[in-house]
Image (spheres, helix red, strand yellow):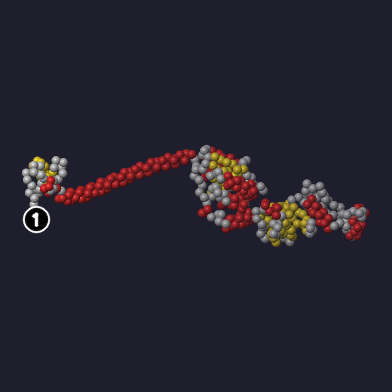
Amino acid sequence: MRKRRDVSIARESTSRQPDLDLFAAPVEPEPRVEPSFDAATSALYEELGTAFPGASPGSAVTVTTVTQTAKDILEGAFMPLWVRGEVIDFKAHRNGHWYFCLRDGSTQLRCVVWSRDRRSIPAPPDDGMQVTVLGQLTVYAARGDMQFAVRRIEAEGDGLWRKALERTKAKLEADGLLAPERKRALPRYPRVIAVVTSPDGAALHDIVAVVRRRAPHVRLVVVPATVQGDAAIEELCFAIDQVSRWNGADTIIIGRGGGAREDLRAFNDERVARAIARCPVPTISAVGHEIDVTICDLVADHRAPTPSAAAEAAVRATEELLGELQSRARHLLGAVASRIDEAGGALHRVAGDLTAASRSAIDRRGSRIASAAGRLHALSPLATLSRGYAIARDDEGHTLASIDAFAPGREFDLRVRDGTVRSTTNFVTPHTDGEA
């Protein structure tokens, strides 16, 4: 048997730690003659016996046993490793898995990203991209292929993050969610502000401090959510939808404090962006970073560089509010006084016009009355009396218009132009036809 050396790098969690030469310091072997295959087999027979699995044709093992054993040995011998190389032959399978090779010079390593591990990778790599991957060397037992199961991928620079950001941005822009005209104005005087963030983070402390200082009358409602990690995306979406269903907030602040680019992954996720877009309440994105812009910043109605800036944008200071109220009161008083002056001038003009119109109407009616009076006077009996005629009336004031009403000796009043004459009938002389 060939002398074997212990392996210094092995996964601690496995119970099987075979002695392999991987990663051991090179040792010059002693010159010896390698035995032939038959000789090696004979040595195994002598040491293990023919009943040992795989030591003889009668004890041959199955292919499944070989590949599964190789899988167990590889996974037991290698802890998760970071490996650097160039991506080639990338393929995305319809079942959600990614397959590609890492190339280093003339050497290639088959790699696979299972669909369950894609959540921690921002975007699929492109062919020719230099990447560093974290994974576990294993064997695909069904085919006996050695492959590297990748859990994380980091590209040189910001290639993957920039690619994922651009892909998500393009989708949202195609749906009109980034259009400036859909941005809503923040309410000037909110009564209730919902804060979607971690209840234990510094972001919430900063928001509370600013709101209490500027507008202590505003009510803050904290909707807790994890802001980083695998659960952050689902919790943020759930918290935003909760506020939407509640419909009791005037403004929503969504965000967290600063962090590394990986920590901000949830705020670049398409699902969180769409949850913000469908929220009926005006939103403020308050991810604490100054340089990069997240997808949530682009979708929200207002972007604040820090949680403190978000709180300042959401509420107005009490002093500022009082100053504005005083300014508006002065403006209102000035407007009222101006309207009163305008109304007084208009009333004065209306009064003058009414007086002139009344005088004109009186003059016109006076003329008509004078004209009518003239016509009436011409037809009046008094006018007839002024021309020398008289009217005879009895004691009851009835006009005596016929000689039949005058009996000899009857007394009557004779009305003349300037008075009445008491008269007595002496005789009556009738007129013949044609006499005046």
- Residue at the (58%, 43%) spot, across then down: 195
Q: Position of residue 71 (x, y in %)?
A: 79, 54
Task: Report the label total.
Answer: 1
Task: Tell me the residue that label 1 is attached to.
Answer: 434
Residue 393, by quadrant, is top left
Look at the picture and state if 92 lies above or below 428: below
State the SS at label 1.
loop
Res 25 visible: no
Res 344 visible: yes
Q: Position of residue 391 (x, y in %)?
A: 12, 46
Q: Position of residue 161 (x, y in %)?
A: 63, 54
Residue closest to the far left: 426
- Residue at the (61%, 50%) spot, across then down: 272
Q: Is residue 139 left or right of residue 211?
A: right
Look at the picture and state if 299 lies above or below 221: below
- Residue at the (64%, 48%) spot, across then down: 234
Question: Where is the N terminus found, in terms of image quarters?
Answer: bottom right
Label 1 Cα neighbours within 10 Å, binned few <14 / some 14-19 / many ≥20 = few
Residue 337, by quadrant, is top left
In depth, the one of 21 and 68 nearer the eye is 68
Q: Position of residue 282 (x, y in %)?
A: 54, 48
In depth, the one of 351 and 386 nearer the eye is 386
In depth, the one of 16 and 186 nearer the eye is 186
Q: Is residue 149 left or right of residue 159?
A: right
In depth, the one of 343 and 324 nearer the eye is 343
Amino acid identity at mark 1: Gly
- Residue at the (81%, 49%) spot, across then down: 17
